[in-house]
Amino acid sequence: MTTQEVDTLPRLSECETIIERGLSTFVEVGNALLEIRDSRLYRESHATFEDYCKERWGMDRRRANKFIQAADVVIGLMQAGPHVAQLPSNERQAVELAAIEPPLRASVWERALETAPEGKVTAAHVREVAREFVRTETPAPVYRHVSDDSYEWYTPTEYIEAARRVMGGIDLDPASCASANEVVCASAFYSLEDDGLTREWRGRVYLNPPYSYPAVEQFCQRLVEEYNAGKVKQAIVLVNNSTDSAWFHDLARACGAFCLTRGRVRYWGPNSAQARQGQAFFYLGPARAAFMREFSAFGIVVEVANVN
């Protein structure tokens, strides 16, 4: 055992003590899970965060992510100021606000409190209030970064061909559909109905994740974990260039190089159109030189020196 591993053991124990207190402390549980995941404390005993949650706590990845999302929502409401009269009392209420852009969450929550039947705020009521708020109060959907259906933006052929040349093939596209796979030609793909976050990831992966939050974060985190665990051998990811996002920085730390596109990608499919912001391609794997050579045709390629 290394000195670094010894140093992390006390903090891992402290985080686990918080989780053992149960659901009544869901904000603390979410923060503890977040620290275990992002600081990779789970690697003391498990290869992936998903394995850790399943074997240590009997919860799947989606359940753990809900705790993390709920904690983030509550902390944001607390920071919104004293005008938030009451905070969510359980993670089910809070997680319904996670898909709302952070600046709007306090307004949606206050409306849910004001309109709750007989003063009982249920998760279902919060969900309905959030949907109505988005429909009537915002000029554009806040659930999506790119479109109303982020699964329906397919990668153009020239990028897929470059990805295939870099990796030598594509074994899995975990966020796809039959139409998109006519171009990607992955040996296997997971559709929206399959829920790729619950399936096995292996080999050479091409990922064009849904751009809605929190799905984009969940898919990117899953990829980094599976790559670090050695299950994913190579990967190329297409995402918005959201350089201020935690998931963007996680990809940057894990990758060997990334490409900032010159101009915006013009996706194809039912929602065929040019994206509303710039994109970035990330490469994870040993063929860094090949990625830099192939993707330099699409924009500036940045080599990452401190690969984790």
Image (spheres, rainbow, N blue to C red):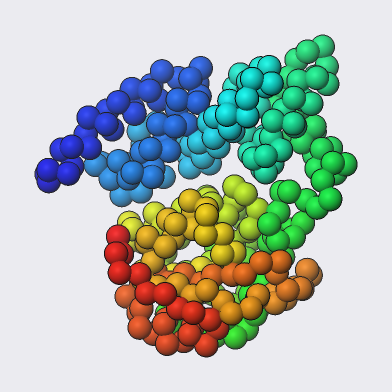
> x and y percent of residue 168 in the render?
42, 83
> x and y percent of residue 221 in the render?
46, 53
Q: Is residue 97 left or right of residue 38?
A: right
Residue at horizontal 27 percent and vertical 28 percent from the top: 13
Q: Relative to residue 180, is residue 40 depicted above or below?
A: above
Q: Relative to residue 83, is residue 234 depicted above or below?
A: below
Q: Can you see residue 178?
A: no
Q: Relative to residue 238, is residue 226 depicted above or below?
A: above
> x and y percent of residue 293 in the render?
42, 87
> x and y percent of residue 238 in the render?
55, 69
Residue at horizontal 64 percent and vertical 40 percent from the top: 102
Q: Is residue 290 left or right of residue 122?
A: left
Relative depth, front residue between 177 and 208: 208
Residue at horizontal 15 percent and vertical 38 percent from the top: 6
Q: Quadrant of the C terminus?
A: bottom left
Q: Quadrant of the N terminus?
A: top left
Q: Is residue 4 left or right of residue 190?
A: left
